[in-house]
Amino acid sequence: KQEVTQIPAALSVPEGENLVLNCSFTDSAIYNLQWFRQDPGKGLTSLLLIQSSQREQTSGRLNASLDKSSGRSTLYIAASQPGDSATYLCAVRRVDSSYKLIFGSGTRLLVRP
Amino acid sequence: DGGITQSPKYLFRKEGQNVTLSCEQNLNHDAMYWYRQDPGQGLRLIYYSQIVNDFQKGDIAEGYSVSREKKESFPLTVTSAQKNPTAFYLCASQEASGPYEQYFGPGTRLTVT
């Protein structure tokens, strides 16, 4: 059974700091992995999708890496800003069930001015 | 603009009443999903539909029902049999072909008293 874990559950950093959010999964037979952002009381916004054959994906100040063999993905945020404050969720899609995403419980990020 | 709409944003009901949450998409996606989110937890899959007139139970389908009569619409009914219906409900849709990226609506917060 695939399980997805995100540690820490909450993180507080000063503005301008570079930071890394972690996501681990128990079964390496994944099709891809998606990182989302969720603002309080809102839906999820897709940030990056990284295919199992890829090592990383970049969008602006965000960089997601994937190490399938160790069951880990990281989301790197450069030069953090208060507007980056949100909950970040990762989700994996298994090879044998492309229809289904399995979510971690998220990391709640606060960037202090 | 293409996207997913959910209505209403907030919904209040008395215990014992059925309630229907609306989800509409104009992304021309075949697959649609309903998730439930509780505080501090990841998303749990309630029901999904990969094609019109067909749907499957997710991980927590008890006390819920759905229909998929049109490609654009996937309403969720929360019945009186659902023991803890108060939650944040998210609708999503997904591309029919790889990489199967999922897109989310803004959510409906249901409070049952």
Image (tube, coloured by chain):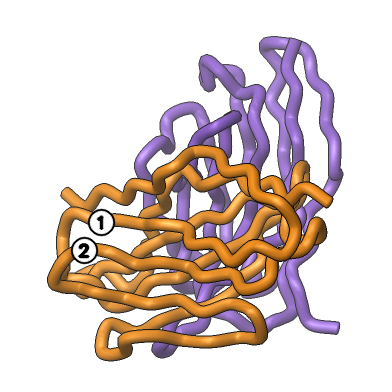
Q: Residue at x 78, y 12 (%)?
A: B14
Q: Check disc 2 and give the amino acid type.
A: Gly
Q: Residue at x 43, y 37 (%)?
A: B61
Q: Check disc 1 and give the amino acid type.
A: Phe
Determine whether, in the image, residue A27 is placed left or right of residue B63: left
Of residues B50 and B94, the one drawn nearer to the viewer in this rendering:
B94
Where is residue A52, by image quadrant? bottom left
| The C terminus of chain B - image quarter | top right
Q: Position of residue B4 (x, y in %)?
A: 74, 67
Q: Which residue is disc 2 drawn over? A: A71
Of residues B29 and A20, the one drawn nearer to the viewer in this rendering:
A20
Q: CA distance from mark 2 to mark 1?
A: 5 Å
Q: Residue at x 55, y 62 (%)?
A: A19
Give the chain ID for the orange colour.
Answer: A
Give the chain ID for the purple colour.
Answer: B
Helix, strand or loop at label 1? It is strand
Q: Which residue is disc 1 drawn over? A: A25
- Whether tag 2 and tag 1 are in contact, CB under 8 A, the answer is yes
* Crowding at mark 1 (Cα within 10 Å: few <14, some 14-19, many 20+): many
Residue B22 seen from this side: no
Where is residue A100, by image quadrant? bottom left
